[in-house]
Amino acid sequence: MPEMAKSDKRFFYSLVPAALVSSLILVLLFIVLIYYSAPAFKEYGFRIFTTKTWSPSEESARTSEYGLFIPLLGTLVSAIIAVVLALPFAISTVIFTEEVIPKGMNKVRETFSTLIDVMTGLPTIVYGLWGLAILAPFLRDNLYNPLYAVLGSIPLFSCRPVTGTTILTAGILLSMMIMPFMYSVIRHSYKRIPAIYKEAALALGTTKYEYSKIMMGMVKPSILAGILIGFGRAAGETVAVALVVGNTFNMPSCLLSSSYTISALIANQFGNAALYPYMINVLVVGGLILLLIGIVSNILGIMYLNRVRYTA
Amino acid sequence: MAEELLEVRVEDLNVWIGDNHILKDVYMRAVPGTVTAVMGPSGSGKSTLIRVINRLIDLVPGSKVKGRVMIGKINVLESDPYMVRRRIGMVFQEPNPFPHMTIYENVAIGPRLHGLAREREEIDRIVEWALKKAQLWDEVKDRLDDYPYQLSGGQKQRLSLARALALKPRVLLLDEPTANIDPVSTVKVERSIIEYAKENMATVIIVTHTPQQAARISDNILFIYEGRVIEYGPTREVVLHPREELTRKFLGGEV
Ligand SMILES: Nc1ncnc2c1ncn2[C@@H]1O[C@H](COP(=O)(O)OP(=O)(O)O)[C@@H](O)[C@H]1O
Ligand SMILES: [Mg+2]
């Protein structure tokens, strides 16, 4: 360590605990989750990932069946729907903010993007309530019923939409929740594109559309980052999803059916999990998986963000 | 394809940015097959002038343009800027090949965008032609799929030039293209600019930071000072027998 003033040394050492605690929390989280999930693995083995039924019994572990397959699939399906729907909106909104709002109107631009940024911080229960009370019935009447009537022969839409709370509703609601995140990630990179490349593209006679395509190509790694970070968010989101996904152990292979996600399962079952042998442990396995999804998608996302080249 | 010859004529050009009167009654004429050098001290409005010609001035908030900028028979100021820019190539002071595209893609992008070529072989041919014209081909022909960050500054600038040339622009604008690059690349850029003008009967306008460069490559010189045209004429005359005191001072390095 280079020479430091005495007071700086003290300052330096005073920072160490905070830094240590921050990194320790993640490690502790892992240790605790692994510790509590171990019994579930010991009792049921890999079966918890492949079983499709969830039939806890108060008497014994032998007669209980805990299958995470459907919620796992539900988490993946709803998060993928969310990302696929949110991405075009995020990209177009970035282009709108940066290229459509005129150069001289920076106030308007900043206000607009602040509004979107604010959406990332809203309590998710608000989205959930709105999704349950308004979005779900609306989608059932105006989207699901027609879809079922017209495309009912396709497996994805082959189940009669009973309630509006379905895996598709969860995906659509999630897409609204993660769109602002993806927007922020992509816009952050887009803003940093040096003017010399914008001029180069325009001087080639590009239309706004062609120009935007070239600029988006330049920040493509940040689009991938947005996808990954958005996916991680969507997979981990709990309250809002628990309200609109329907919470039933139906296969999410039909998008119009209610289903489950890992996060919703944990939220719904944890309260009485203590009554059933091993249920807590199985739920912790679910938590561990969500943590892994979150960590991997965020680490990869950040790696991609650093890959944007701003100079030739 | 019979290629039309496009003369550039600027008449009564006035440009304001905000409240600043940047160009004042500027006029010039650049003829096909020649190189016109725009010179003058920094801040005199050279960049602004050539940005009016391809309407990049539109990007500057608060800019106002009056007058006529004729390219052939059309007035640029009353035309669709996208159509204008397609026929005008531009090279900037800072080398700016797209960092996310390979060397090949950087040159191919123009022809691809404007549908000049669809077949791969056709595009290959244009890319090779443009890189040769920009005197870069020999240095990159074995690594067309590399990214531009692996090139030197001078090579990047020649790549930017090749990208512009690939569209075979009838008018080529260059804004101090050699200000930031090495002497060897400077010579190559200069040679390719002259060649391109003569071989293709293109109209070339180059902003230059040194009278020496203007003398080396141009047929005509436009000298501007504080937004006004001070002197305009054949290069030999302007350099050897400047009519104006200001021009003489500028050539002597006094302003
Ligand atoms: N984007 C801009 N906003 C405000 N003023 C500008 C802008 N671009 C150029 N100017 C002003 O216009 C004048 C001419 O600039 P410029 O054309 O770049 O000169 P040159 O290229 O001869 O150095 C300068 O006074 C400069 O401050
Ligand atoms: Mg300039």
Image: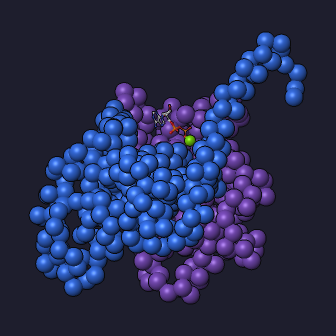
Quadrant holding the N terminus of chain B: bottom left
The colour mode here is: by chain
Q: Is residue A38 visible?
A: yes
Quarter of the image with the C terminus of chain B in it: top right
With A39 as the anchor, is A4 left or right in this view?
right
* Rendered shade, chain A: blue
The residue depicted at 79 percent of the width and 58 percent of the height is: B184
- Which residue is located at x 76 percent, y 70 percent? B139
Residue B116 percent across, percent down from the top left: 45, 78
The reply, left or right, for residue A90 in relation to residue B47 is left
Quadrant assignment, res A206: bottom left
Does residue A177 show up?
Answer: no
Q: Looking at the picture, how far across and down is residue B185, in whole percent? A: 74, 59
Q: Residue furthest top?
A: A7
Q: Residue A160 sits in which quadrant? A: bottom left
- Please tell me the colour of chain B: purple
Vertical relation: A254 (above or below) A167 = below
Coordinates of residue A183 in the picture (x, y in percent): 40, 49
Q: Nearer the viewer, residue B82 or B101?
A: B101
* Residue drawn 74% across the image and 17% down it: A11
- Residue B107 versus residue A305 in the image, above or below: below
Nearest the viewer among A147 and B218 is A147
Name the residue rendered at 55%, 34% in the picture. Answer: B43
Q: Name the residue furthest left.
A: A141
Q: Is residue B83 above or below residue B206?
A: below
Residue B101, position in %: x, y? 59, 65
Horizontal placement of A215 versus A304: left or right? Answer: left
